Amino acid sequence: MKVALLTGGGDCPGLNPVIRGAVQTLTNAGHECVGLLEGWKGAIEGTSIPLSPAVTDSIIDKGGTILFSSRTNLFKDDATEAKNVPQLQASFKRLGIDALIAIGGDDTLGVARKLHEKYQLKTVGCPKTIDNDLCATDYTFGFDTALNICMEAIDRCRTTAESHRRIIVVETMGRHAGWIAAFAGIAGGADYILVPEEKVDIEKMCDVLKKRRAAGKMWGIVVVSEGIELPEGMVKKSGEVDSFGHVQLGGVGDTVAEIIKQKTDIPTRAVILGHMQRGGSPTAFDRVLGTRLGIHAGRLVVEQKWGQMVALRGMNIVNVSLAEATGENRTLYPEIMAEAHEFF
Ligand code: F6P
């Protein structure tokens, strides 16, 4: 078979180890691989590069994706679907592609699922997102790298906050879920954590911060997820909406810092980590998880288990259907915030 791979959505440390694992497994089994460039855009336009172990051998430590990425949505509306699907089918025919491994988050995998269910495309999926908010898998690769970047940033903010006797608000990514904020806050010893899963209680937070200062702790760290809802709504970076209908978030850290300053009179600054969290080399955990998922996605193709996705359950890689894997975001488990609340 000739097997295509594509990476869609926001980039994520660990994508290249997935590609490397899948290409090695498929080549070992006697199949040929190509990479489609820029996610579904490359699938529609038929822009591709040959992939072999020689190409993917040295990418284990490389951040981002050698296949590039985009948020192209084949199924944006009926007209897009009517135009894009025949184009994709024609491109696959021209390139001689028999099967596809789609590596992405909920949006990319949702497209893969529809192409399989409605158009019988031979496809398998591999879950990806730094946000860790995909159901059907225990952890997504990229999350651990993002978390460690946040933790290091918090550690650095702590020394400057301490020197200036200030509060620093650190804003993390996590559009629908507070996994990054909660884990980074716990790992960084935050004085308060705000996540989308909990109703924001500004008065309580300011009270905690004031009491700590009165008790002698003259500095503090507040971690806030970009997706929290303030009484006036979510803070959007711009009115920009992508082809899956997501608004661009970012900046709530500045608003929270301003509120804290006004309500507590404590000098406060904000740091927005933004895309720093998605960049750079993957951690060992993400390299191993990515490689294992890639190998198992390759095996799904070899076994012709179409419409399936690889997932981590405990220590094992298992198969789940794309239908089970998409459609609902996995929000932060309440027990984790209950544990975090022991400190505030
Ligand atoms: O992929 C998820 C995510 O990292 C979100 O946490 C964030 O809101 C979004 O991507 C940012 O996407 P973009 O790079 O398109 O601005």
Image: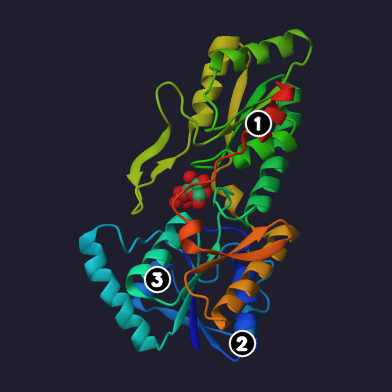
Q: In the shown orientation, is residue 4 left or right of residue 162?
A: left
Q: Foreground residue, 309 or 17?
A: 309
The residue most toward the top is 214
Within 10 Å of disc 1 (Cα), the crowding (few <14, some 14-19, many 20+) is many
Q: Foreground residue, 326 or 53?
A: 326
The residue most toward the right is 216
Q: Earlier in the sequence, mark 3 or mark 2?
A: 2
The residue most toward the left is 79
Residue 118, by quadrant, is bottom left
**Would you name the residue on which mark 3 appears?**
116
Residues tagged 3 and 2 counted as in contact (Cβ below 8 A): no
Q: Foreground residue, 107 or 189?
A: 107
Please say if 221 is above or below 299.
above
Residue 168 x/y as whole percent: 64, 27
Amino acid type shown at disc 2: Thr
Badge number at residue 27: 2
**Label 3 secondary element:** helix
Residue at image position (55%, 54%) is 129
